[in-house]
Image: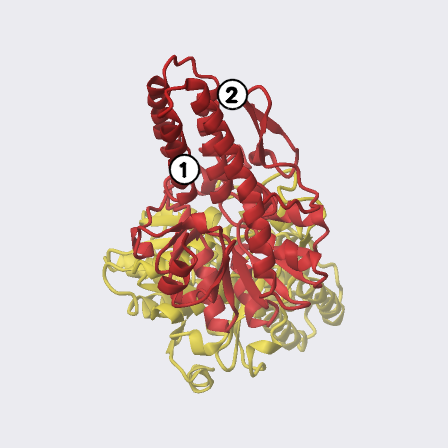
Chain colours: A red, B yellow
């Protein structure tokens, strides 16, 4: 399934022999490309919380590797003792961020494999199975992104201007990206596209990460402040929008980076198709609508210190801050959901159910 | 006409005896309150360009005072020689920023007074007339803001949440503000309102200036990233929006800070009234629609260096930047235009014409 594409991107996260997980510290980008080596699940959790690694699919990979590190370095003598340690690691990793469902999906998947392997009573077998599963989740994620990109590229017209918000790129996945995977595939197919990159306040993932990925790939891109997209739409300069997702409810409601709902609503008003690209693991079939998706609130300093890029607050002292990390876009504003298994169209209850395993 | 209100704000700009104009250097706010003393029109122009003084009405006052400085310190021996110097000063000041019409309006008004006074052939009389006119433009502006605030406050319901974008406050005028004048009047009337403050990228006038004004006045306010307002609208947490204007066409189309159009469009979609507050001097009756309003493009560094708050770019190297300072909101999205002479309602061709002198 590991269908590698020639991208200029280093691995977002990978397993090194000897029980080390190496990930790109994305808070240092685009100024410096720094890798961080982790050997414990706590270290992985500490990397997820401040967004050293972020993006729903990449968080899933990181969580799976966190479980793998726990198993690999465990001194447990019995399979049951190891399962107990893995359960604690799962709790630690699950508490890092609430919105991206891939985190919980990956943890469940690894735990299920561990429990099955533990039936043998062989500790080494559990360790091997857990590490193999984490590697497979990550390799799968890359392949799913490529499949998604190729499905989605069919929706991107030749010569169009594509708006994207936040970073749903190689850095948000095991590689290649979801929304940026669609853009990469369209570009590789020779379609002469141009990308409008929303800077994406507060943490500036668009300016720092998406603009960097576009530069690495040589895909023409222009950076804008988030509040500028509406004016470009009114001028007819945006042909479509493609974003990623942190969780999709069974009815097609989409939780994604704050500002996504505004983009979708403005697209609707201007008759511009708004697409969401996400692996099927981002769909939470247990939720009937987006109203049930928990929305993470983050620290005021991300706003007042400009994505933590300034040492002092630029905002007036004492002002209150509202900093929700995500918003929910209702399914009616979404023209299509692009998955690794194909493109779902409304009504999404049916379209997404048909793509379910 | 000088109806002072008890606000906690220092004068945005004022004439000091001896031929000095003192203005707040707004690029230093909110960290430090620094005054800059100007004695030449070139110095005033140098303050307008980097937004040390900004906001359409305040730019008008600054331009008028720039003309007054030119006249006051002139060594011209004849009225005609002084007129020639004033003409050069006008050209210099008019070239600072293209969008706010109050700049050109104020320069015309001062030049007309100078030309009339020059008929006497008395240089001292021209000087006196020009300085008096500049002072009057500024005193008028304050009084107009108070009138506008009181007219507009009637549109603000008790206990509502008001969204505002950029800074249309005391700092954007001779004092009291346009949009924030409406908010000040509603607050002074005892209406328990709360203000959502868009941070307003790229230059962060909301985070730096509007949040500061709200803190000075003790008006409850919460700062948000620009991309967050849409989600608050969907949650029913915004009752109305009030913004200022840099130029209004005769048909009611409004040029204002980039992002205003997005706010207006989203308000329309959510059934939220969107109001514009501006003195009648902001209406450019010579333009039949907003399509004719020149839109200023500003430097990429305002985006990449986060409103010039960082020493280095936070954006990926080499990415293109689009940084239009303003956008145009079509009149159909504007529920009312609040002026110093009363509130205009659609159709604005008639409503605004009726308020014309």
Residue B280 lies left or right of residue B343; in this view the side is: right
Foreground of the two, A146 or B155: A146
Query: Residue A39 shows which numbered tag?
Result: 2
Label 1 vs label 2: CA separation? 21 Å
Q: Position of residue A136 (x, y in %)?
A: 52, 37
Q: Quadrant of the N terminus of chain B?
A: bottom left
Residue count near mark 1 (Cα–Cα under 10 Å), binned few <14, some 14–19, many ≥20: some
Per the image, the residue denoted by label 1 is A109
Residue count near mark 2 (Cα–Cα under 10 Å), binned few <14, some 14–19, many ≥20: some
Q: Where is residue B40, by image quadrant?
A: bottom right
Foreground of the two, B174 or B112: B174
Residue B199 lies left or right of residue B218; in this view the side is: right
Q: Residue at 38% x, 12% y: name it.
A: A77
Q: Chain of mark 1?
A: A
Foreground of the two, A107 or B49: A107
Q: Chain of mark 2?
A: A
Foreground of the two, B145 or B169: B169
Q: Please report whichever mark, 1 or 2, sits nearer to the chain's N-terminal start.
A: 2
Outermost residue, front direction? A120
Q: Position of residue B260 (x, y in %)?
A: 48, 64
| SS of the residue under disc 1 | helix
Residue B250 visible in the shown view:
yes
Query: Residue B260 shows which numbered tag?
Result: none
Q: Where is residue B326, by image quadrant?
A: bottom right
Q: Where is residue B289, by image quadrant?
A: bottom right
In this rendering, is residue B252 above or below A327? Answer: below
| SS of the residue under disc 2 | loop
């Amino acid at each position: 399934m590991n269908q590698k594409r020639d991208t200029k991107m280093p691995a977002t996260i990978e397993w090194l022999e000897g029980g080390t997980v190496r990930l790109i510290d994305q808070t240092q980008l685009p100024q410096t490309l720094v890798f961080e080596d982790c050997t414990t699940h706590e270290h992985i959790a500490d990397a997820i919380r401040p967004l050293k690694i972020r993006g729903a699919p990449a968080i899933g990979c990181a969580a799976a590797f966190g479980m793998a590190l726990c198993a690999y370095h465990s001194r447990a003598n019995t399979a049951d003792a190891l399962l107990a340690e893995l359960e604690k690691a799962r709790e630690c990793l699950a508490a890092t961020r609430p919105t991206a469902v891939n985190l919980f999906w990956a943890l469940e998947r690894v735990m299920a494999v561990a429990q099955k392997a533990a039936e043998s009573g062989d500790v080494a077998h559990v360790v091997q199975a857990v590490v193999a599963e984490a590697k497979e989740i990550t390799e799968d994620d890359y392949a799913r992104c490529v499949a998604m990109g190729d499905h989605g590229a069919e929706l991107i017209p030749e010569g169009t201007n594509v708006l994207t918000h936040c970073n749903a790129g190689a850095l948000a996945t095991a590689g290649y990206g979801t929304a940026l995977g669609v853009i990469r595939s369209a570009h590789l197919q020779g379609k002469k596209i141009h990308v409008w990159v929303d800077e994406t306040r507060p943490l500036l993932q668009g300016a720092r990460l998406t603009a960097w990925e576009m530069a690495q790939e040589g895909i023409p891109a222009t950076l804008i402040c988030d509040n500028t997209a509406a004016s470009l739409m009114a001028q007819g300069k945006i042909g479509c929008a493609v974003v990623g997702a942190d969780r999709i409810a069974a009815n097609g409601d989409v939780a994604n980076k704050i500002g996504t709902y505004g983009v979708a609503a403005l697209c609707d008003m201007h008759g511009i198709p708004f697409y969401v690209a996400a692996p099927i693991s981002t769909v939470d079939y247990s939720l009937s609508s987006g109203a049930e998706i928990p929305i993470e609130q983050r620290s005021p300093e991300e706003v007042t210190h400009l994505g933590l890029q300034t040492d002092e607050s630029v905002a007036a002292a004492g002002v209150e801050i509202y900093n929700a990390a995500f918003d929910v876009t209702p399914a009616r504003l979404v023209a299509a959901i692009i998955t690794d298994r194909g493109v779902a169209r409304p009504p999404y209850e049916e379209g997404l159910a048909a793509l379910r395993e």
